[in-house]
């Protein structure tokens, strides 16, 4: 009995001193209060669904390793979700905001990740997030209007951060890929089609300006409503006016899928480049068909769905994702941002030693995290810094083309930037002179 008492005392002492560092639960067996991560986003879109999966994967990993150290106590993450339906064509911004606010008031999250899908919802929700003083790490919505609004009142909007790219980053990558097409392949006729939303207009607008400066002939610059279901007029215009390149920017799954089918059916002899998710998805060959060959897409940031031989973190993340969910992410964008955001939040909480929103914001502003998408640091407008040269210095993206390997199998080949490239652009047979 004496030895038993000594043993119990020893266990109690060990528990007291090791609990804060190794255990997510108290020695009394009572679970530590969780840290609530709110995810208000559109689950209609693969970006929202796959981003949520990436968040759950990161949370599972962190909790298995003991959770998050807040001061001297380890606490687990807990994810709560609200489908804002903001990515569904026709959903009013107000409806998405109502779902956003309901999650905040009901679940009382300590932080938000992913956030709005549609840029219009992001801009409207900034005041909501500021009102409730909840640190938010946004990982989908891409409009540059975010930083424009932030600049007007940094003190008010300090709780908002963008962990992913904005539309100007992938647009720059595509613009520089167009430079290659012009210089090395003598292409010079381009037709722009874009979704009439804030982020797509910014993306297409940068490409348009770049092409005007670099000597491209612009056939047309046409916007279509996000709910559009017929692109045959645009494709006819491209065909009749001799477009060599169709630069398209679109993210609504239904419209993008219809466009791709019509492009294939109408046999438009132009190279597709830009951001068209069905043609960038790892499942494109099955869902679209072999006609995806030669199409060029930007993935932003790296690690969203394409494992890159030259960036081992993308391979590691996507291998874990595939093991857990059975396939690579469908969406060729922002999934790695969602995964990184959870680890950035964990790091900031532990450095702050608190869940106080103002202390957490101060810690987030000092973020210097090497993640799947590259090195993530925030500028004065709380935007993650992205470049085109070195993932050890900034976040990075990648441009790839569907090409056949030596066995005739279609695969996505990185072609830009050069430090990530595994091959060069190949023109379709009908474009070769």
Image (tube, grey):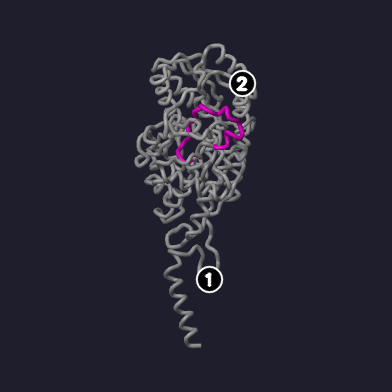
Which mark is in front, 2 or 1?
Answer: 2
Badge 1, how many Cα within 10 Å: few under 14, some, many 20+?
few
Locate residue 269 relative to residue 183 in the image: left or right: right
Please state the horizontal and vertical placement of residue 433, each as a whole percent of the image.
46, 15
Give the secondary structure at mark 2.
loop
Spot the residue most to the front.
Answer: 407
Q: How many marks?
A: 2
Relative to 118, 391 lies left or right: left
User: Along the line of sight, which residue is nearer the eye, 129 or 82?
Assistant: 82
For the residue pair 424 and 110, the one nearer the viewer reads as 424
Residue at screen point 61% across, 40% down: 43
Q: Position of residue 259 (x, y in %)?
A: 60, 25
> Where is residue 295 shown, x and y percent of the image?
51, 27
Query: Residue at the spot x=58%, y=30% of the render?
Result: 290
Q: Disc 2 designates what residue?
A: 231
User: Taking 408 as reference, is 72 above or below it?
Assistant: below
Q: Earlier in the sequence, mark 2 or mark 1?
A: 1
In the rendered image of this protein, does residue 10 appear above or below residue 363? below
Quickly name the residue at label 1.
28
Which x, y percent locates residue 27?
Answer: 50, 70
Indicate yes or no whether the magenta region holds residue 294. Answer: yes
Q: Say left or right for 380 vs 305.
A: left
Residue shown at 35% from the left, 35% from the top: 389
Q: Find the magenta span and give its range.
A: 282-303
SS of the residue under disc 1: loop
Note whether residue 162 is visible: no
- Category of crowding for the residue at label 2, using alpha-carbon neighbours closer than 10 angstroms: few (below 14), some (14–19), many (at least 20): some
Question: For the residues marked 2 and 1, what is the alpha-carbon distance in whole angstroms?
Answer: 64 Å
Residue 290 appearing in the image: yes
Q: Nearer the viewer, residue 186 or 102?
A: 186
């Amino acid at each position: 009995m004496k030895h038993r008492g000594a043993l119990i005392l020893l266990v109690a002492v060990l528990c007291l001193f090791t609990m804060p560092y190794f255990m997510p639960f108290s020695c009394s067996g009572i679970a530590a209060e969780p840290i609530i991560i709110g995810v208000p986003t559109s689950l209609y879109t693969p970006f929202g669904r796959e981003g949520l999966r990436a968040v759950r994967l990161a949370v599972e990993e962190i909790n298995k390793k003991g959770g998050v150290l807040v001061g001297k106590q380890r606490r687990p993450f807990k994810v709560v979700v609200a489908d804002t339906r903001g990515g569904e064509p026709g959903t009013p911004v107000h409806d998405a905001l109502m779902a956003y606010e309901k999650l905040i008031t009901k679940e009382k999250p300590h932080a938000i990740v992913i956030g709005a899908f549609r840029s219009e919802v992001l801009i409207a929700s900034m005041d909501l997030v500021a009102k409730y003083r909840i640190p938010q790490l946004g990982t989908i919505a891409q409009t540059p209007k975010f930083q424009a609004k932030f600049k007007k009142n940094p003190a008010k909007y300090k709780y908002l951060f963008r962990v992913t790219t904005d539309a100007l980053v992938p647009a720059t990558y595509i613009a520089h890929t167009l430079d290659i097409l012009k210089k090395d392949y003598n292409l010079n006729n381009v037709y722009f089609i874009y979704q009439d939303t804030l982020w797509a207009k910014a993306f297409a607008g940068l490409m348009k300006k770049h092409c005007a400066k670099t000597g491209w002939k612009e056939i047309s610059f046409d916007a279509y409503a996000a709910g559009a279901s017929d692109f045959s007029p645009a494709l006819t215009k491209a065909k009749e006016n001799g477009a060599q390149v169709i630069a398209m920017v679109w993210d609504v799954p239904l419209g993008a899928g219809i466009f791709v089918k019509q492009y294939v059916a109408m046999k438009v002899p132009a190279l597709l480049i830009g951001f068209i998710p069905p043609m960038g998805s790892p499942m494109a060959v099955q869902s679209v068909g072999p006609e995806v060959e030669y199409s060029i897409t930007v993935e932003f940031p790296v690690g969203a769905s394409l494992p890159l031989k030259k960036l081992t973190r993308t391979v590691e993340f996507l291998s874990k994702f595939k093991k857990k969910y059975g396939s690579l992410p469908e969406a060729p964008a922002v999934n790695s941002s969602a995964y990184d955001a959870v680890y950035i939040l964990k790091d900031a909480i532990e450095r702050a030693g608190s869940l106080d929103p103002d202390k957490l914001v101060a810690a987030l502003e000092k973020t210097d995290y090497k993640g799947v998408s590259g090195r993530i640091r925030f500028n004065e407008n709380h935007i993650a810094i992205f470049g085109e040269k070195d993932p050890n210095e900034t976040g990075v993206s990648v441009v790839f083309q569907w090409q056949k390997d030596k066995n005739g199998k279609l695969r996505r080949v990185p072609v830009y930037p050069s430090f990530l490239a595994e091959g060069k652009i190949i023109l379709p047979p009908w474009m070769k002179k």
